[in-house]
Amino acid sequence: MNNLEIEKIRNILTLRYNPSQNFLLPKMDSSNYFSKLNIDHTKKVEFLLKNSIQKFIKKKSPSNISIALSGGIDSITVLCLVKELFPELKIHAITFGFDENDYDVDQARKISQKFDINFESVIFTNFMNNLPEQISIIQEPKINYYWYAVAQKAKEKSNFLFTGDGSDELFAGYVFRYSKFLETVKNSSSWEEKVKSYLECHNRDWVPDQEKIFGKKFDFSWKKIYKIFKPYFNNKLEPLDQVLLADYMGKLMFDWMPSYSKIYSHLDLQGFSPMLDPDLIKYSASIPIEKKFDEKTNIGKLILRKILKNKNILLDSTKKGFTPNFLLFWNTYGKEITSTYLKDARVIRDNWISENWVNNALKNINDTNDIRYINKLLHIISFEIWYRLFITKEMTTTDHLL
């Protein structure tokens, strides 16, 4: 691997993404967030969302569409506006979860019934089993692209998949992180202190001894990681505006969107989120943070909630995030996968990953069931599969892990 590839892998194994790809969305910086408009933001956002939907449907003229539907505000807002604008359009709802009793699956089923649209769920059990196929499409060592199965199911119904992607980053949806961040930063905090706090709010992406993961060929430094985030926190924005900017220019820009784009291209499927309309992205930065997030109640996406409330749709504000039960997965599949693929790991043999760290991580999991170490070991597995696909070329895309 060359130096750029090494840096890419190091960033992915620490942040879950690498911030050096082409920009698929408008690039934002702190200057976009200073012009705070005093207007009716709810009406303006609804207007921009409707305009985006109308432009897309009138241009593409689909006979039917699929929509990735959850129990969350973003996808329900998109569904509500599509039905309002194009009531005769045939819609297939696709939801996903880790068992049939999953909260999102249950809520999506109820919403589908309310709007009288077709409904189907994709339930993941061993979500890593076809990891070679997922990685061959994404071309990066990751484990979190269950979305491929969702897109496959959507393609069976339509050539168009509507989503609510971007809502969390634009309208303050990651509320489970905001309070923690605000508790640990002050107005006098340096940009580096804010970056450390921000990363602590994403601590499932790394482990306390992160620097010990890498073998001799990786030159890991937390200072290099911190500098990636400096432009987002070394400015005069409100702390939560800084967080939203970092979220937008991080996982959304360099993780979700590039990967989804590759999946859609692979399936010849057109993905569309009205939340990611360039006009709406730029406008969202002009909305004061208190219009997006209520710090006292810890509720976000206030504008989208108002849009739905105006249409007599009230949602639970305690929606859980979409994530697997990693401990259950570890005991059911993960432990066996790890034993199989790290017993004679090429990434350890070739001095990319520390064998000592892997052994200590396994002991840690055995003693404490630490989810962070389970998560990180599974990402090391993804690196091993990536390595066998693209470097040693001893695996094929059709291989299954178990």
Image: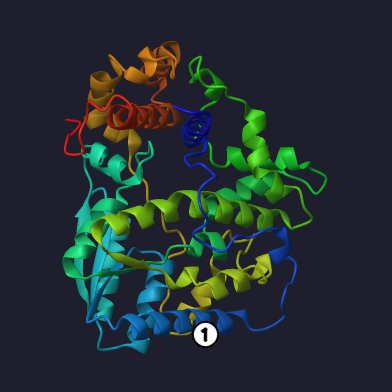
For the view shown, which residue lies furthest in the right direction? 188
* Relative side of 213 to 281, left or right: left
* Relative side of 209 to 322, left or right: right
Estimate the x, y position of residue 192 in percent, counting from the top left. 73, 38
Rendered position, 22 above or below 366: below
Q: Is disc 1 placed on a helix, strand or loop?
A: helix
Estimate the x, y position of residue 234 in percent, counting from the top left. 76, 48
Which residue does the numbered mark 1 point to in the structure image? Answer: 47
Could you tell me if residue 100 is visible in this image?
no
* Residue under the image location 60 percent in, 60 percent down: 27
Could you tell me if residue 123 is visible in this image?
yes
Rendered position, 304 above or below 201: below
For the view shown, which residue lies furthest in the top direction? 356
Estimate the x, y position of residue 97 in percent, counting from the top left. 27, 52
Residue 136 occupies which quadrant of the picture? top left
Three-letter amino acid code at disc 1? Answer: Phe
* Residue under the image location 49 percent in, 65 percent down: 167
Residue 387 occupies which quadrant of the picture? top left
Rendered position, 58 above or below 178: below
Q: Nearer the viewer, residue 103 or 145?
A: 145
* Residue under the image location 69 percent in, 69 percent down: 288
Q: Residues within 10 Å of mark 1 (few under 14, many from 20)?
A: few
Quarter holding the C terminus?
top left
Quarter holding the N terminus?
top left
Estimate the x, y position of residue 228 in percent, counting from the top left. 64, 41
Residue 347 occupies which quadrant of the picture? top left
